[in-house]
Image (cartoon, helix red, strand yellow):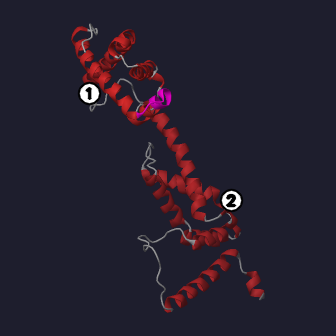
């Protein structure tokens, strides 16, 4: 009894570990129960033993014993955790080798190890959050520095500057054409459509064209929902007008590309 009281936290941990090992050996002799679900494909590196080892480490005063339990039961878990977090979340914006980054994370986990208590939950979850937060901050900071250091005169060989300029000109032309298209259609709306319901749909579409810069989600489904909400009409009524306007848009853009302006509309 007196000998048990004198045991240090790390000594108690190793005694518990020995007892746990015997328990597992006894359980292995029993008939195996069928377990549901898939068998784990990877051996766990961060277990309940790691949790207990960290608690023992934190409560131990003897440096040699702390070093022993850390090197035998904690270091590998921290090292593997850092490795997995880096690759899983692709924290690759560092100007130092990967191994150095991993060592930095492990060192940071060591700085925070004293804060862990069993009532905080599983050590794996606790230290995963710490590692991830550290890497987010460091990764973002390094990414910002890398961008700032990039010489604007250095051109990436993979870039097609000619293509980029052509695309930029095309986008500018498309904006100018769309403005002309909206103006023309607004003026001639009652001539193009005679049905009041169709005019309402077309006018709603033109309004969406006008405010297009402020619309974040320009996918087809979202726009149809938006038009239905504004007009109160069914999808088939909207589709008919959309198809007519789409044909006019294509025909007019072809003429615009040749002349630089829309010109007279032909149905």
Q: Return the x and y of residue 48 as percentages of the image width and height.
A: 58, 72
Label 1: element kind: loop
Q: Quadrant of residue 38?
A: bottom left
Whether residue 107 is situated above or below residue 216 in the rendered picture = below
Question: Magenta residues?
Answer: 226-234
Q: Nearer the viewer, residue 134 or 11?
A: 134
Q: Nearer the viewer, residue 207 or 89?
A: 207
Label 2: element kind: helix
Q: Nearer the viewer, mark 2 or mark 1?
A: 1
Check the picture and name the quadrant holding the C terminus. top left
Q: Magenta segment: does it hold 242?
A: no
- Residue furthest to the right: 2
Q: Nearer the viewer, residue 264 or 34?
A: 264
Q: Magenta segment: does it hold 232?
A: yes
Q: Nearer the viewer, residue 254 or 17?
A: 254
User: Residue beneath label 1, please?
Assistant: 160
Q: Return the x and y of residue 230 as percentages of the image width and height.
A: 49, 27
Asked whether the beta carbons under mark 2 and mark 1 sit within 8 Å of each other, the answer is no
Viewed as shown, does residue 127 lie left or right of 79? right
Viewed as shown, does residue 50 lie left or right of 168? right
Can residue 253 be seen in this snapshot? yes
Whether residue 99 is situated above or below residue 188 in the rendered picture = below
User: Residue beneath label 2, please?
Assistant: 115
Secondary structure mostly taken by the magenta-highlighted segment of the chain: helix
Q: Residue at x 39, y 34 (%)?
A: 235
> Local crowd at mark 2 within 10 Å, few (<14), some, or many (≥20)?
few
């Amino acid at each position: 009894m007196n000998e048990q009281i004198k045991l240090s936290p790390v000594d108690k941990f190793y005694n518990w570990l020995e007892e746990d090992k015997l328990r597992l050996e006894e359980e292995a002799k029993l008939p195996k129960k069928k377990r549901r679900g898939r068998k784990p494909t990877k051996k766990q590196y961060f277990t309940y033993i790691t949790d207990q080892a960290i608690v023992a480490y934190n409560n131990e005063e003897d440096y040699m014993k702390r070093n022993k339990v850390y090197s035998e039961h904690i270091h590998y878990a921290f090292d593997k955790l850092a490795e997995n977090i880096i690759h899983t979340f692709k924290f690759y914006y560092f100007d130092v080798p990967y191994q150095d980054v991993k060592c930095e994370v492990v060192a940071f986990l060591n700085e925070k190890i004293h804060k862990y208590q069993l009532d905080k939950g599983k050590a794996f979850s606790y230290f995963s959050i710490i590692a991830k937060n550290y890497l987010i901050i460091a990764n973002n900071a390094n990414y910002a520095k890398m961008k700032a250091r990039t010489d604007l005169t250095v051109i990436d060989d993979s870039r097609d500057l000619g293509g980029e300029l052509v695309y930029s000109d095309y986008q500018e032309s498309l904006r100018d054409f769309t403005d002309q298209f909206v103006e023309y259609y607004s003026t001639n709306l009652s001539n193009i459509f005679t049905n009041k319901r169709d005019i309402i749909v077309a006018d709603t579409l033109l309004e969406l064209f006008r405010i297009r810069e402020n619309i974040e989600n320009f996918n087809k489904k979202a726009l149809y929902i938006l038009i239905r909400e504004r007009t109160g009409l069914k999808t088939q009524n909207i589709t008919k007008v959309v198809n007519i306007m789409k044909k006019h848009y294509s025909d007019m853009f072809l003429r615009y590309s040749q002349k630089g302006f829309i010109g007279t509309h032909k149905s």
